[in-house]
Amino acid sequence: MPQPTNPYLCCIPRINFHRTMTPEPFTLQQIEENLRYLKLLAGKFPNIPAAATEIINLEAILNLPKGTEHFLTDIHGEYETFSHFLRNASGVVKRKIDEVFGNRIRESEKRRIATLIYYPEQKLELLLRSEKDPEELYNIALQRLVEVARSAASKYTRSKVRKALPKDFAYIIEELLNETAAGRQEYFNAIIQSIIRIDRAKPFIFAICRFIQRMLIDRLHVIGDIYDRGPAADRVMDALMNYHSVDIQWGNHDIIWMGAAAGSDLLIATVLRVSARYENLDTLEDAYGINLMPLATFAMKYYAEDPCTDFIPKTVTEEQKAQWNTRFVSQMHKAISIIQFKLEAQAILRNPEFGMQDRTLLDNIHSETGTILLEGKSYPLSDTNFPTLNPEKPFELTEEEVEVMSRLRASFLNSEKLQKHIGFLFSKGGMYICYNGNLMFHGCIPMDADGTFSTFPIDGQAYSGKALLDQFERVARRAYLNRGRRDAGLYDLDLMWYLWCGAHSPIFGKQKMTTFERYFVSDKEIQKEPRNPYYNLRDSEDTARGILSAFGLNPDTSHIINGHTPVKAAKGENPVKAGGKIFVIDGGMSSPYQKVTGLGGYTLIYNSYSLVLAEHKPFESAQKAIEEDVDIISNRNLIEQRTQRIRVAETDLGQELRRQVNELEMLLFAYRKGLIKEKQG
């Protein structure tokens, strides 16, 4: 349960919500111990009626059904698919329409209403083109949308609904939501007709569609990897920043952008390399205003005659390989990769406690034979052109490389939009979250083969399990807060890089990252990246129960939800593991993974009755959805179902509201005993 931030709350006794009030629920000593805090609380609730009213309001909320939670992971810049998932709430909107209209209207009409709710501006414009009587269209659409909105808002208090209403139409929508009595149908119709008559139907429809979307999902959980691979991570971040309630668990692809925004040369190089690998430099240049000219000029100087075959972007087709821009990106890709390998070796040598001494590979290159020594064996190199590598000092950047990185660092630190997005990741994110009985993290809890939590030193002290994740998060926050400062040390930034590729990183989850081998060595065996033992042990319910207990959750009722490793559904892999205790919901929202998964993604929906895993087919396009009312084809798998609805009282919010009720009851007692004076107002 969240702990009070005010030090005076620590002594306030916990009171059973359903207890029978006695004449003396508190002792005078308890009141005196908390008197200072209670006087502060009295500033907000200055008398008995005010405090009593708030208690009644809070207790009413405790009896409402819990809001619906929506879980997504591994978005990887796929904005269009991600946006559709948000708009259709993984099928929740369509189910609500079915619930409201039943057999009263045809399936084609239900699909049309659903598409209108998902894409109101585009769909309405399309409908109006073929509509002979726009007023009739507006009238039918408004009537039906109000019905859906009324049902969507029914499980929330009027206060919460009111806060969610769009400002321009708040009063009108509130009136329409509450006009359920048959005798007032004429009043309802009059409002609809007025909206149409004064030419406000379009903006009203847009507003009520967005209101429905907001009401149907109470909380969004994003379990990592917003960045890389796809073309529009910045648009995903914009959407998240505008979302009404969201938390984010950092993924390994997020942490490199976070470290780059904090000023790490090594992670700046890593971001650039990954972006070039997937031909996604436009996000850096166009979205974030990163000046890539220094790198481009450097790459053209040293790699102009180099075909850079192994650095052709992953997304390039055979026909595109001969194009000049492909070769240009490939040259930049190779240039920044060599810089990254040098900077990695420097970080490893600075931090022997990382245990990565075997990953300083550039000093193992034998240029005269065109080979490299790896794990005691010599392998031929597929590419032997290293024009910026000094065999005597293989880890040292040239003066030009130093200048390139200096200018890139300044660009990252001064990108207003990037800093805004990364600041949001820090404010809404973390290594993990425990929420309503679910433990969410991106990758794994680092473990040894025997099932114990593995240890790793941070700031000179060994940590494991929950404490290890807490310390990694603390250091990452410290690194970002100190960004750009001359006295900021490299250790924190190096630890952020370790989170990207270190053996004990909870968001990497492998023993090593063989990036160099994948570029320069053809032997597939040396390219393998053994996974952390967690991934073999997570099929065991005992493992899951041990992790849940370590994070302070009830192993009988709680679950672990993570992503990071695409579920090979096409080969029969089950996303539900450990006897239903663990859900792996990376099903391939990112198109490069869909060949592996055979799917277009998983999402999880947790409402007041059930926990549902939705399995989605690949999303075609928003345009097709708008024009043909095509939704994502999804299979819903019921994981758990309750016979009675889960109430707010059973959630984390409910625990906080109970605490507030407890404090207000103590304030009432203080008023009635004359220990605090009431104020009129």
Image: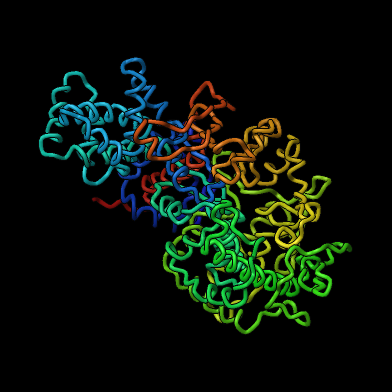
Q: Is residue 251 left or right of residue 88?
A: right
Number of numbered discs present? 0
Colour convention of the picture:
rainbow
Q: Is residue 680 left or right of residue 473?
A: left
Q: Is residue 635 left or right of residue 172?
A: right
Task: Identify the residue at image location x=68%, y=54%.
Answer: 508
Q: Can residue 492 be seen? A: no
Q: Position of residue 74 (x, y in %)?
A: 56, 47
Q: Is residue 574 left or right of residue 166?
A: right
Q: Position of residue 427 (x, y in %)?
A: 49, 58
* In this view, 18 is above or below 7: above
Residue lying furthest top: 103
* In this view, 345 is above or below 84: below
* In this view, 348 is above or below 499: below
Judging depth in this view, the residue of 149 and 122 nearest the camera is: 122
Residue lying furthest right: 376
Indicate the quadrant where residue 298 lies. bottom right
In which quadrant of the rendered image does the N terminus lie? top right
Q: Position of residue 290 (x, y in %)?
A: 47, 69
Residue lying furthest bottom: 399
Q: Can residue 664 be seen? A: yes
Indicate the quadrant where residue 277 lies. bottom right
Judging depth in this view, the residue of 43 and 137 nearest the camera is: 137
Task: Identify the residue at image location x=28%, y=52%.
Answer: 679
Q: Position of residue 51 (x, y in %)?
A: 35, 44
